[in-house]
Image (cartoon, coloured by chain):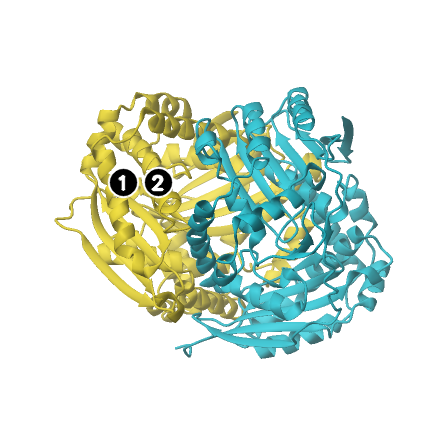
Amino acid sequence: METKKIDKNTYKIHLIKTDKFKNIDVRISFRNKIKKEEITKRNFLTSILTYSTKKYKTKRDLMVKMQDLYGVNISAKNIRLGNSMLSIFTMSTLEEQYTEPGNLEECIKLLFEILFQPNVEKLKFDKESFDIVQKNIETEIKSFKENKDAYGITRMFENMDENAPFSYRMVGYYDDFKKIDQENLYTYYKEFIQNNIIDIYVIGNFDAYEVEKFIGKYFKFYKLNKDFSPYIKNSKMPKKIRKFIETDDLSQSKLAIGCRYKELSEFDFKYTLTLYNLILGVSSDSKLFRVVREQNSLAYYVYSRISKLDDLLLIVSGIEGKNFEKTFKLIQEQMEAIKKGDFTEEEMEKAITFFISALEQLEDNQYEILENYVSMQLLGIDDIETRKQKIREVTKEDIKRVAKSIKIDTVYLLKGDKKDEEN
Amino acid sequence: MKKINLKGLDVTIYTKKLKNGLDVFLIPYENKNNYFLSFLTKYGSSVDDFVPIGKKEFLHIPQGVAHFLEHKMFENEDGSNPFSFYSESGTGVNANTWFTRTQYICYGNNEIEKNLEYLLEFVSAPYFTDENVKKEQGIIEQEIKMYDDQAEWKIDDVLRLGIFKNEPTRNDIAGTVEEINKITKEILYACYYTFYTPSNMAFFASGKMNIDKIEAILDAYDVKYKAKKTKIKTKDYKEPDEVYKKEQRMKMNVVVPKLGYAIKINNTQFSCTPEFLDYYLNLFLTIKFGLTSKFREEAKKEQLMTSFYAEIFTISDHTTISFYADSEKPDALIEKLKKELLKRDIEEEDIKRIQKVWKSSEVQMTDNIEITLNNCIQDYLRYGQIITDRLDKIKMLNKKDLDDILSKIDFNNVSYAIIEPKEEIK
């Protein structure tokens, strides 16, 4: 595998050459600071751009074109990383050995066509496409509550700090949605296309010279935007645990616990914290899984997750409403146990092996290789070899120290009040 | 071992049948670091009545036993468990139950041989007690309730209750809370010894492996677990061809109504093989209702639906074509669907385009060891063999045969379900 980074001054091209896969993926990422009021508009925009273009007036026309190019897949998504928002456009196609000469250029051309030749007439997005995308977005926003796990976690974060980016609803907001029309969406498009930091990534078996040439041919970008760190640093530690209970018409109650930590050393932040989380609640052999599920039969799932970009630790489970206090107590006990050093060498060794094995397994997956590369570039994560080596340097004392700095901030229960649950 | 090649796809499969009856399929990849193993039994939630091994009378079991059994296989007599064992080498372990099979999988990049030995071992050593059965009831109760709150699962569960009258396939794979509380260790043992015999099982592996070493481990397993002379007797549910209920409506805690719409077909009436039946039904769905369909475009323009997808499903003699949609006007969508299903407007050029896409997708899938393994398992369960010339067969698809199949289907043999919100949409 060979990587090459080309600085085009106003944007960067990253080429990752590997012959392990039959696909070539091209990804364009648009990145800037997240603003709550921009999320809905941005979702609308990426949806409408991938819905139709100047030349392919409907979704159907566009899809027929993609099928003609041997089923090339072009899609877009918006994600939040800490205090940044990314719009990622991905094109995935088979290499020409399995299609025909010229196919790769055609696919790259189509990707840029989607971005730069939108279906716009007289400074307005096309009405037909607009109406259909509008309905989709409206449904998505309205049905956000239907995914109870995600909803419970979001409500916990909103109770924790409603102004922090980690509590933003990435599906968007109905009030913002209502303000969007064909005209102001196009105005926003023009801003969007100018005011983001742009990276283009290509991974697969391709001719680097040729691919760079294609990109130059179909993509021009002249504005230089200032880069920034996506990390949100936590400044306030909780003085006491805050509990919130809301009810909903559910069979199962959803528990979400938000914890904070602050001012960890770089090593603790990068490695000790990761190992702490693995011991606490990542795998089916972690403390939470063993105690909450296997020993006490309280849940089918229970896990912990670290969001390093937000300085947060999250613990999630689905339980019986009446078992809330009991479950919460058991979770607290497990966190206390790690503080006191009540974990074995074997637990540490297993967590390290899990971490290393996951890094090694990533090499078989094109998407994961790219994700890992992006994380290294964007988030300053160490390379795989360094990570494998450093994780071994974590000691039991390190873990106890980090465990002590983690404090529970907010506990949230979305309590199911379906009748059959009360017996 | 017998060597078979997937034509045009650079994939070679090594296969054999052990003396004890276990079917083995190995798919080695030279350029991968990881491996994926699946040990499965051809037993799932679609059996509620059978003659236990060594008995003469039929036994009726509660719903959800196959899935319950899957959970309980993770319990060993000496108190150790697979989660703990596999985490020593950073290997993932899991299991899942489907209507027609239960599989135990492990995946990783370390110690494949040791992990394989353990997989064969733990799935071959049941240990059920009154206490560990009781313990699992609480866990599975939460699993059932988790799915119960998810409307996209619920719509499928409700739809099956309308399609099937007698087949246990109509019930949720995990059962209901009431049913799983009837499960005892005796029931679990009866199921285990009947369905978990090598001749009713298969082993699949893909990824990085040394074929000879894997074969040696399987041979040792063959010596240790002898064949049992048994014929598994399960009940013929005499499922009628007609749908059980035409229409079901229920209210749930959702914001946007959900529609499920299914056509039930007797699949023994066609002259083509099951494989071609599947190709043609999928071709029909892709062209008529897929991303390039006129139907989808119009229905979206008329704001009849937002998300929408279709799939086919086969259980013994019946195949269903099912549509699922988020729709604020489900009844209007049903009318439109009905009309569209009867329109015969597929052109040769549509078929050509889909053939091109399918060929690309077959090539793409071979890059992924897990997908390739799952495709082989599906072939094995559905067709009784691995399909080696899929690309050639895709090339053979034509309008005449498609029309012939469609002409035999009664598109009025429909069952549908609608989940409506409890509260009005604001």
Write down the residue under mark 2. Answer: A281
Q: Earlier in the sequence, mark 2 or mark 1?
A: 2
> Label 1 marks which chain's residue?
A
Q: Is residue A241 left or right of residue B207?
A: left
The span from disc 2 to disc 1 (Cα, nearest Å) is 10 Å
Q: Residue at x 59, y 65 (%)?
A: B324
Asked which quadrant contains residue B267, the reply is bottom right
On the image, the x and y values in percent for residue A70 come to: 68, 46
How crowded pointer 1 is (Cα within 10 Å; few <14, some 14-19, many 20+) is rated as many
Q: Is residue A196 left or right of residue A117?
A: left
Residue at the spot 79% in from the left edge and 53% down from the top edge: B274
Q: Which residue is nearer to you in this view: B230 or B28?
A: B230
Q: State which chain disc 2 sits on.
A: A
Q: For the point 75% across and 42% down, which residue is it?
A: B230
Q: Which chain is represented by cyan in the image?
A: B
> What amino acid does circle 1 point to?
Gln
- Which residue is nearer to you in this view: B248 or B57? B57
